[in-house]
Image (cartoon, grey):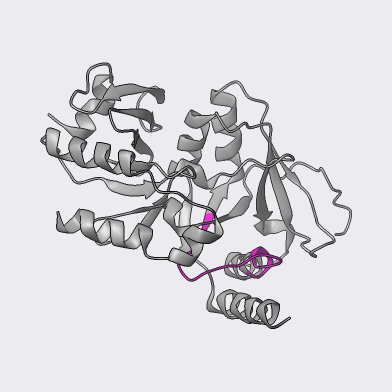
Amino acid sequence: LDCRLKGDPIPPHDHVALHCQPAYLLDVDETGEAIGVSSDVFRVDDDGISTNWLEFQDADFETQFATACLLLTMGRTVRARHRVGIIVVANVLAAGAAANKAVSVIHDPLEIPPNPGHALITELAVDDQKVFQELAVVTELRVFTQEALRRSKAAESERRRT
Amino acid sequence: VLALERQLNSLLSDEDELVENGMTISTASLDGLVDFLAAHRLHTHPRLSLTRNGRFAASWSPYSRAKLTLIFTREAADWVGVDLDATTPVRDKGVVLIDSLNGMPPPFRSWIVD
């Protein structure tokens, strides 16, 4: 993790990735395809909204995205219909500021399961509907990499066997 | 009707996931959505999703950084809208009855009906 510490703010021009699930929380168009996220995908836990920082890894964007996909599979099930939401940190901060909330996006590397890119969006509450709606419109939806889906499926099979 | 059927099939297709998350679908909310779609002459058919508590939500997004969402009960809908591309960004929320959009400000209302 170099000199970066747990709790450090993530630079505004960087990106975080959100595991958008369950699939029924995604906006579907007239063909039934997922084309956006609903505000309910932003799940507020006790410590904040769980995401993954892409630029913790010094690499090109697609490599960073692929790594984030793999890390998002750690300890959880990823299905083919789930999506990855990519959000610019500055947009998160702006949405919080517009609601007079001291929102932060901080690095929160985890040891178990190991996730050096884990990050948290803090200081939001479940009833911050306007903020979540704003986050929904600035979230770019992408599909998980095939490698992440393959690994998640293998891990799920292993869990069921044991 | 075909679009609505496709959307419902998509949202409700993964029974395992619904069960795993203890999801109970609100049929009252579905009734509210269907009645709303029938009661208004809409510009475009909305996107649909579910909320974590099983209510149906319809959204209109006239451009990429703007979105209005209605979340239905049997008789009414909670709405929340943002327009980040307006000269002064707009963020608002409220409640409307199923058969009336009274109370919803014009910028958002005009995304749904004339």
Hey, which quadrant is residue B10 in on the image?
bottom left
Magenta: main secondary structure: loop
**Quarter of the image containing the N terminus of chain A?**
bottom right
Asked whether residue A42 appears in the rendered view, the answer is: yes
- The residue sitting at 41% across, 32% down in the picture is B84
- Seen in the picture, residue A149 relative to B91 is either above or below; the reply is below
Q: Is residue B90 magenta?
A: no
**Quarter of the image containing the C terminus of chain A?**
bottom right
- Give the number of marks: 0
- The residue sitting at 28% across, 55% down in the picture is A29
The front one of A98 and A115 is A115
Image x and y of residue B30, in percent: 29, 43
Q: Which residues are magenta?
A: A70-85
Lateral position of residue A110 relative to residue B37, left or right: right
Asked whether residue B59 appears in the rendered view, the answer is: no
Hey, which quadrant is residue A93 in on the image?
top right
Image x and y of residue A31, in percent: 25, 62
Lateral position of residue A88 relative to residue A74, left or right: left
Image x and y of residue B91, in percent: 42, 25
Hey, which quadrant is residue A23 in on the image?
bottom left
Image x and y of residue B89, in percent: 41, 25
- The residue sitting at 48% across, 48% down in the picture is A139
| Residue lying at the far right of the rendered structure | A3
| Residue lying at the far top of the rendered structure | B103
Q: Is residue A78 magenta?
A: yes
Lateral position of residue B47 relative to residue B3, left or right: right
